[in-house]
Amino acid sequence: MGRTGGRRYRTNRARVLQGATVCYLCGQPIDQSIPAPDPMSPSAHHFVAYAAGGGDEVANLRPTHLLCNQKQGDKPTRVVNRNSREWT
Ligand SMILES: [Zn+2]
C-alpha cells in the first residue's frame, strides 16, 4: 500500500471522479475540464485518511476540489455543507 500516486489510487480516482458533479467537502460544483494543479480541479479525497488506516478503494474515495482536499489533509472528514446529502 503506497501513498498518493499509486496505480490503484489513480485508477480508482478516475472512477470516482467520472460523473462527479459536486465536491463532497464544500458542496460546490466540480468542473471536470479544469486541469490540475488548479485549486478547483477535480481530486479524490480519502474519506478515511491513510493515517487512520484508509485505503485507495473506491468506497473510501470522494470527489472533491483539489483545494478542498488539500485543506482537509489527513484530518478526519468533516462535512461542513449542510445541504450535502448522505453519500450513497
Ligand atoms: Zn470543494
Image (cartoon, rainbow, N blue to C red):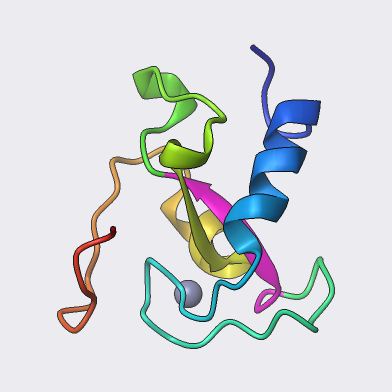
Answer whether residue 42 is magenta in the image: yes
Query: Measuring 65% from the left and 52% from the top, which residue is drawn there?
Result: 15
Which stretch is magenta?
39-46
Residue 7 drawn above or below residue 62? above
Residue 6 in view, yes or no: no
Quarter holding the C terminus is: bottom left
Residue 81 drawn above or below residue 16? below
Query: Residue 67, percent across and down?
Result: 58, 68
Determine the residue located farthest toward the left in the rendered image. 82
Between 87 and 26, the one nearer to me in the picture: 87
Query: Residue 21, percent across and down?
Result: 53, 80
Name the side, left or right, on which 5 lies relative to 85: right
Answer whether residue 87 is magenta in the image: no
Which is the main secondary structure of the residues drawn in magenta? strand
Q: How many marks?
A: 0
Query: Residue 30, percent across and down?
Result: 58, 82
Name the side, left or right, on which 15 lies relative to 24: right
Residue 8 location, quadrant: top right
Query: Measuring 67% from the left and 85% from the top, which residue is drawn there?
Result: 31
Residue 32 location, quadrant: bottom right
Quarter holding the N terminus is: top right
Query: Measuring 77% from the left and 75% from the top, which residue is drawn there?
Result: 38
Determine the residue located farthest toward the top in the rendered image. 1
Query: Measuring 57% from the left and 30% from the top, which residue is drawn there?
Result: 56
Residue 19 location, quadrant: bottom right
Between 57 and 3, the one nearer to me in the picture: 57
Name the side, left or right, on which 69 lies relative to 77: right
